[in-house]
Every structure is written in structure tokens, then in C-alpha cells.
Amino acid sequence: MKSAKLFLFGFLIVLLGCQKDADTTRQDGPRDSRLKIKNQVIPLTPGFGLKSEPAEPIGFEFTLIAEVDAPVVDGQTVQATHVEIIENWAFVSYNMRGSQQLGAIDIIDITNPAYPQIVRTILFDDKDVNTVGWHNGHIVIAGQDVEGAYYGFYSLDDESLEINRLQSYSAMSMVIENNDVYVVSGDTGGLTIIDADGNEEFLPYTDARSVAVNDNVFVLTSEYIDVVNGDQIPIDPNYIQYASKAELSLSNEYLFAALNRGGVHIYDLDDLSLFQVMDRPLTPEGMDEENFVTNGVSYNEPLLFAANGAAGILVSGKSDLFKSDHEFLTYGYFDFEGPLSTNFVKSQGNYVFVATGLGGLKILTIQEIPNNDDCIWQEETAYGGSESGSGAAWWYYLDNTGETQHPIYAGQQLIEDAYIEINPINGSDNIEMVIELGPKLRLQDTNQPVKIQGYNCGELPTSRPPSGLFTTYKGDQLVIELPNYHYYVVHLDVEVCYEP
């Protein structure tokens, strides 16, 4: 399977790298105008119904790298429904809230964690896209249109779409595993398994919501979780909401079930026994409790993420880092500085993708941070750049006409995993500078720790310029829009983590 995956990945690169988009796949204006780089650290807060004080630090930092506005199809804003990550590409599907069927797919290049880019957008003016995947050189989609539930194969090569009908009104969930496609459709539908040759096997289920696959196939319905050709796990019939999103997810040890009113149920895969229940969030006074339910779940060892509707994304974890008895410990919610309804979360590798309905998509990175007990933080002066400045005092500068990524030096030492990246801004003469400090640097708690001066050709000083006189930028931001200069001197007041 690994060699087949790499082949498909290479095929995708060729298609995306050499083809021009057809008019039907374009938004009005540049696609990147929908993607906004943020580079903002997101804290975890107690959230709804949790403890009054946050738990102890868990050793991970979450950074909101970018926000992606939802596409507009036929004048209507669609909503994010699913994310599938294949190598360095994220496929994002969208549908239309309500009875109208409109959909879209974004293909996002996540090769550079600090600067994801939308490389292609595909619009559908007659169908919802509820889920997306990749199979044998095609994008696989599933959802509903005026005729009911469907699954289909979209070719990036010739932009053709082959649609196949499913029983029921809407396809709800899909998994692609071992070259087979597993898709479930809802009320009056069931599980359809499509092999590499296109042959279908259909298993009827009443009100199927989600499918998960490892050595077994698990199907979530509103009444039970079925292990195909095996056992059943009963579910309280009051848990699952009508026509709502509910989801299964797997790890090597556990089956996770997002059961709406039932919260997250965690089952031990050895015997399917109930290992733990993480309750739905409490409903704040005066708000509709039907909006405070668990719609999605994703495990990325050792972290567990739950999409808890209007309460947002709950973060928990299971390891010695969290609790000695190895249960999942609830830590808190992502604090996006305001209420934000979420119905889907996907975490894989160093990423967390959060679907926020009409609010679009949020892309976060996960970084393991050193324990402060293992650091001696020392104040230093830092400069970013690939070129060493002249004169008696040390300094660096970066040349905007060469490489786009440049190292950071602090105390005259190169800092690992710290860099400065310069990116063009579509439709503007300005540039965007992204300063990535990494785990070994942090800004000093001083006024204006970031100072930047731009220089045109022929203006670069012959000795270290005094940063107090910099005028291009002074502040504390790490993502900055700047006028386009030939050279930049970037001075940072930082603290460096030195091991004792």
C-alpha cells in the first residue's frame, strides 16, 4: 500500500503542477484571497461546564496558522463538512445548509506548515459534497443531489465526474481503505463497499451515519454500532439527533464514537467494552441544548479532539503526560476569542483542521514544547537573515530577491527550527513576512520586541543599524504585511531556551 500511495501522490503533483484550472473551478478573484495567514497561538480554556481552572500544561502548543473562508457557489456560501489528508495535501469538502444542493472541494498544499496554500477549488452547482477522499488517481466524493444519495469519482486530468447512485437520500460518511471504498447512506440506506474494479456490495442499515475501517468494519447507526460480520454495541436511542452528523474514529486501541447528546463513547477494541464516556458539554443558561452536542471526534496520539457544536473543540489526552491511570483527561477548549460552532475536526500528523460551518475552516499546527523545567531562559538579541552584515558588531540581513526562507540567529548562534519566510500577497505590491520562533525561542515581554527596517538596492548600511531608529515596523506581531524592499533587517528581542 505504501508504494501505491506514493504513486498516487506523484500523480497528484503532476496534475496540479502542470494543469490550468477550468473556468468552472475558479472563484471570483484569487483563491488565496480566501486563505488568511494568522500564525496565532491558541490557548486552551476551561470552556463550557469544565473545571474552573485549567489543568496542568500538557506539553503541546497549538498555533492557528490560517483561516479559510468557505467558497461561494452560485452566490451562496457553502459550509465545510470533511477533511481528508493525503501526504502533503488536504482535501476539504463543502455542502449547502438547508434544502438547496451546492458543494465544493478545496485542495490545500500543506507542505510548508507555516504557509498552506489553496492550489485548486472545484465547484458543484447541483450537489452537496458531504465527504471526500482519494482513490486510484481520482478524488472521491459522496453526498446528495436532487436524485438522492450518490458517490462519484472526479478526474483532475479531464475534469470529468462519474456519478453512481446509492440507496437513501444522502451519503453521510466514507472511508477508503486497502483500495476499497466504504460509504454509508442514511435513512433507508446502508453500507456500500466498492472494490478496485468498481464492483459493489450493499449491506442495508436503518439510519446509518458513519463508517470506520481497520481489520473490521464498523457502522454507526442511531441505535447501535455494528461490527460487520460480528457483534453489535447498543446505543441509547435518545443520543443521536435527527439528520445530524455523528461519527466514528479509530486508533490501534480504541473505537471512538461521537454520539451527539451522548458525548464521546470510547470502546476498547480488544473486547468492545466501554472504556470511558466523555459527556456532552453543559448548555449555558438561555441557549438551546440541541446545539451543545458532540458531532465529530478525531484521535492523534496522544491527543483526542471532539467537535462539541456551539461549545467548540474539546481537547483531551491519554498518556503518562496527562494522567497516571491512563484514562483520557479533559483539558479544555480551543479559545478562538469568541463563540464558534464546530461540527467536524480532523487531526493528523502535526495538523488540526476545524470545520466551523459557514465560518469556513481553521488550520492549526501542533508542536510539542519543552518543559520549562528543562530550560534556562536567557534574554538575547536575535537577527533573521541568510547574509552576514559588515562592521565590527554582528548582525544579519535577508535578501528579498533570493530564497524565501531565512534562518534566525540569537546570541550569534543559529537557532534550530526558527526561521523567517517571505511570501508575496496576491493582488498587492506588498509582501507578507512570517516569523517562526520554534520551540527554543520566545519574544521578550517588552514593548515592541519585533523591529524591521527595509532597504532598497544600494541603501544597505555598512555596519549594524540601530534598531531604535527602525521605521518600517515596530511591534509584537509575527505575521506582518510590509512594503516590498530589496533587503530587510529583522531585529528581535527574544528569550532562548538553554538546557541546564
Image (spheres, helix red, strand yellow):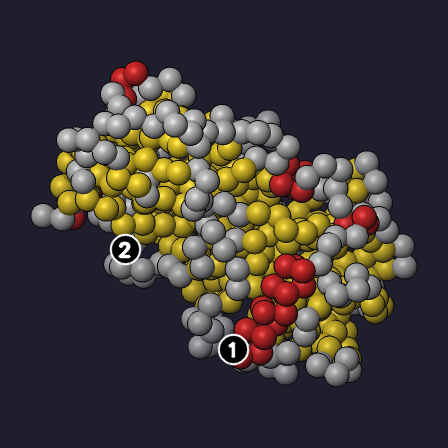
> Mark 1: which secondary structure?
helix
* Residue 470 at least partly seen: yes
| Residue at 53% from the left image edge and 29% from the top image edge | 430
The image quarter containing residue 411 is: top left
* Residue 344 at least partly seen: no
Q: Can you give x and y, in whole percent of width and height, for residue 115 in the image?
A: 49, 45
Amino acid of disc 2: Leu
**Does 495 sit left or right of 346 as displayed?**
left
Few, some or many residues within 10 Å of mark 1 (<14, 14–19, 20+): few
Few, some or many residues within 10 Å of mark 2 (<14, 14–19, 20+): few
The image quarter containing residue 302 is: bottom left
Q: Can you give x and y, in whole percent of width and height, for residue 31 in the image?
A: 67, 42
Q: Residue 321, which numbered label? A: 2
Q: Nearer the viewer, residue 419 or 175?
A: 419
Q: Can you give x and y, in whole percent of width and height, for residue 422 in the image?
A: 45, 39
Farthest residue toward the left?
Answer: 500
| Residue at 56% from the left image edge and 53% from the top image edge | 109
Q: Residue 438, which numbered label? A: none
Farthest residue toward the front?
Answer: 458
Q: Nearer the viewer, residue 138 or 416?
A: 416
- The residue under label 1 is 2
Q: Is residue 86 above or below residue 310?
A: below
**Location of the N terminus (image quadrant):** bottom right
Q: Can you give x and y, in whole percent of width and height, for residue 401 in the image?
A: 46, 40
Judged by depth in the image, the label closer to the viewer, 1 or 2, is 1
Q: Nearer the viewer, residue 276 or 218?
A: 218
Dot 1 or dot 2: first in sequence order is 1
